[in-house]
Image (tube, rainbow, N blue to C red):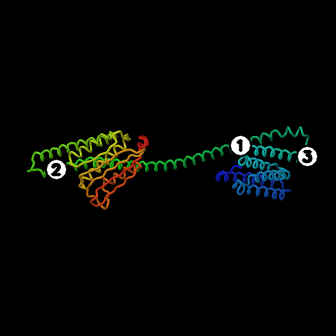
Amino acid sequence: MEKLDKQTLKVFSIIIYISIIIPFLYALASNPDNIYRLTALTSIFLASLTIRLFIIYTDERYSQFSKIMIFFDLALVYWILLYDKSDVTYVYLFVLIGDAILVHSSNYSFTVAVLSFLTFAFSIYVKTGYPPVQKYIFEMWKEVINFILFYGIFYVARYQIDQRNKLQTTMNELDSKTKQLIKAYDKLKHSSEELEELTIMEERTRIAREIHDTVGHTLTTVLVEIEAGKRLIGKKDDVAKEKLELAQGQVRKGLNSIRSSVRVLKKGEDVLDIVPSLISLIEETELHTEVNIAKNIDENLSIPDVIGKTLYRFLQEGLTNGIKHGKATDFVFNLNRQGEVIKFYLCDNGCGNNEIIDGFGLSTMRERVEKLDGDLEIITNKDQGFCIKINIPCLKQEDLND
């Protein structure tokens, strides 16, 4: 059963009532002897139609019951036609045909149309006193055309209603999808803005780390050399001059390192030959700061570039903090690989501390270790030095890039 929308049901109801009431009034005027019978039968017919239109057709559960009611109404119309000598009430049959076409399936509506014609034909056959069949059939041909015409009109109307309903459904779906797309677009835009802001923050943090690691280590070594030079002025002027020249050279090197870091950041390159770079960092630190660094580095160590760059920064940060804050003069540094784990160890003889305070350097170190799925352990006590132990799983380069 096709559920009618409110607008279609309203129009259909008006047409039905007009199609019943006007012929009914004409039939009453033409059949004064059968007024009561026609009134009673038509009232039952109207009541049946009203129940279908406003109760049954609003609930699809009563579909089969509505079909039975239409057959019942066909019987009512047959008796109405028998009592109506003017034959005007045969319009009721068209009402039933329209009812079946607009609400029910094509097969059912065709059946109702055939039965309606047979009902009309048989009522005429009875009222005319059972004329010869051949003559009667010939007279009925023009009525067949009328029924076919009305059936076609109602069928076209049903098609137009179906197309309108499909169009309305499509429009509603489009409207719903448009709202969903707008909502998705707003969400995507918000996510894009958040991602852009996060990217900017990550880039700022990265630049800050590069500047901190490069400048911090350079300035620490320069300060040590300047302090040594100041102490030697007036005592060993030649050595003091050498220290100041070394400090000057270290500043130049620091500036070059900053420029190099900026270029790397700009190009997105982070390629580092880890073992030679670590050895070079240790040797330069010993040269410029007069500290001793006992190193044990596996020279055949193969490490992905991302981890290598991070380990370099760890050593740089550890040496800088040990010299600047811990006043350390001796360091022990070990770097090796056990299975799939890279082990980093740096320990100094500095002043140490009973409380670990994470500054920018240590905080950055922790973040980098966590990002590489590693673990960081710091061991320190007052006057007992400062030790850093780091274990990092040596993942494949492509996994780290992801």
Instruction: Return the x and y of residue 369 as percentages of the image width and height.
Output: 38, 50
Where on the picture, by quarter, is residue 336? top left
Residue 269 in sight from this viewpoint: no
217 to the left or right of 393 = left
State the residue at coordinates (57%, 47%). Answer: 173
Which of pointers 2 and 3 indicates the residue nearer the eye? 2
Which of pointers 1 and 2 indicates the residue nearer the eye? 2
Q: Secondary structure at mark 1?
A: helix
311 to the left or right of 399 = left
Q: Earlier in the sequence, mark 2 or mark 3?
A: 3
Q: Secondary structure at mark 3?
A: loop
Q: Earlier in the sequence, mark 1 or mark 3?
A: 3
Q: Earlier in the sequence, mark 1 or mark 2?
A: 1
Instruction: Return the x and y of residue 167 as percentages of the image width and height.
Output: 60, 45
Where residue 129 is drawn, which disc sits there? 3
262 to the left or right of 373 = left
Q: Secondary structure at mark 2?
A: helix
Q: Answer few, some or many: residues within 10 Å of disc 3's Cα (few below 14, many 20 plus, some between 14 and 19).
A: few
Q: How many angstroms separate mark 1 from mark 2 (CA)?
A: 103 Å
Q: How many angstroms separate mark 2 from mark 3 (CA)?
A: 137 Å
Q: Which residue is mark 2?
A: 226
Of residues 146 and 362, the one nearer the viewer is 362
Instruction: Return the x and y of residue 233 as percentages of the image width and height.
Output: 10, 50
Q: Which residue is mark 1?
A: 155
Q: How many angstroms separate mark 1 from mark 3 (CA)?
A: 34 Å
State the residue at coordinates (82%, 48%). Answer: 87
Q: Answer few, some or many: residues within 10 Å of disc 2's Cα (few below 14, many 20 plus, some between 14 and 19).
A: many
Instruction: Return the x and y of residue 48 as percentages of the image width and height.
Output: 77, 56
Residue type at mark 1 is Tyr
